[in-house]
Image (tube, grey):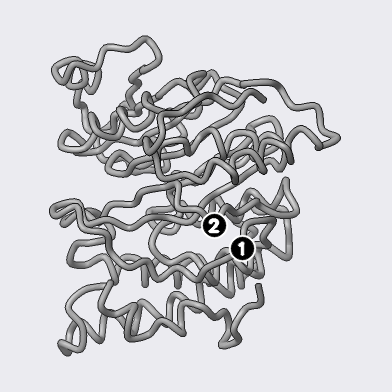
Amino acid sequence: MTLRTRTAGSDHTDLGRVRQFADEMERSELKVEKDPLVSVVIPAYRAEPFIQRTVRSILGQTWTNVEVVIASDDGVDYAALLGDGGISDSRVRCVITGGVGTGPARARNTALDAARGRIIATLDADDLLAPGALEILVPLASVHGAVYSRIRFVDHETGAELQSFDRPLRTGPVKLVDILSSQIHTYAGIVFDRDRVAARWPEWMARWEDVYFYVRCFDDLSYIYHVSEPLYIYHRVAGSICNRPGTGEEYLAWADELARRLERGDSLGLRNATSRDVFRRFLRSRHAIEQEFVQALATGICSDYQSFIQLRLDAFYTLDGAVSGG
């Protein structure tokens, strides 16, 4: 892989670490395509305030063999909206789900079906990729099958960086149990090789569908590679699914429903029995957490999910009451 020249101070990535990752790829016994096309898939629902900034974060990547596929799930003509903002690039394509509010799973699958690249990167419409992110993540996805990074957590309104409560993991291969006992804020970002990972998002699953995708990857892979550098910029947006009244009850109900299905012998389309059990344990753990969150809100113990996390951080780092190993 050829590393592209960057302007000094133009991004927050560690160039030495990029070289390390590139060397790792070149030493791999796998035959890796040089500079593969990367398709960044974006589900878009009421994304007008964010989409221009999000697309610019992709088109400005040092990895230039990239396309952006936006799946409109609200009837908005995002191509026209981008054009109004001065973004006219043949690498950007817009498709439609055929409905309104059908959900992020259907939107992501719609974009995935339209994608031309072998390497797929997922990005929510209100989030960003850090400069140089794809240059690090794409070679790792080519070697390992799938990769994700630590997040940088930012308040959309103020631009202030917020504290991320994700449990830190070292750079390297990680097992499912460690992912599910460390990641709190979002499962929206992952980069994967579609020739090695056949996972899709379950369109019938109204909540936890992003976590399910990670679990489903373990039907095809023995691990997912983790990068400890924050390359995915996650924005807290007032009124979004994760930050609106009633969210706790929705996640609570779906955690219970999915756990019950697994306990009744429903595989949920997951072939790996170990992964199914880890997912079941995760859902039972999160059911207890969401139940406590709903009660804490009702009694005024906390004001939102972020403040609740600070109160019960230990619970997020455990499955079945036992702290997971690194």
Left or right of 10? Residue 149 is: right
Rendered position, 258 above or below 212: below
Residue bearing mark 1? 170
Rendered position, 89 above or below 24: above
SS assignment at label 2: strand
Task: Characterize the local packing of mark 2: few (<14), some (14-19) or many (20 or more) Cα atoms within 10 angstroms.
Answer: some
Task: Characterize the local packing of mark 1: few (<14), some (14-19) or many (20 or more) Cα atoms within 10 angstroms.
Answer: few
Q: Position of residue 203 (x, y in %)?
A: 44, 44
Q: Quarter holding the N terminus? A: top right
Q: Position of residue 177 (x, y in %)?
A: 63, 68
The amino acid type of the residue labelled 2 equals Ser
Residue at 29%, 71% (x, y): give it: 249
- Name the foreground residue: 7 vs 74: 7
The amino acid type of the residue labelled 1 equals Arg
Rendered position, 40 above or below 184: above
The residue furthest front is 8
Residue at 44%, 58% (x, y): give it: 208
Q: What is the C-alpha distance between the residues marked 2 and 1?
A: 6 Å
Q: Position of residue 285 (x, y in %)?
A: 50, 79
Residue at 33%, 85% (x, y): give it: 292
Rendered position, 287 above or below 138: below
Residue bearing mark 2? 228
Q: Position of residue 20 (x, y in %)?
A: 67, 43
Residue at 19%, 26% (x, y): give it: 76
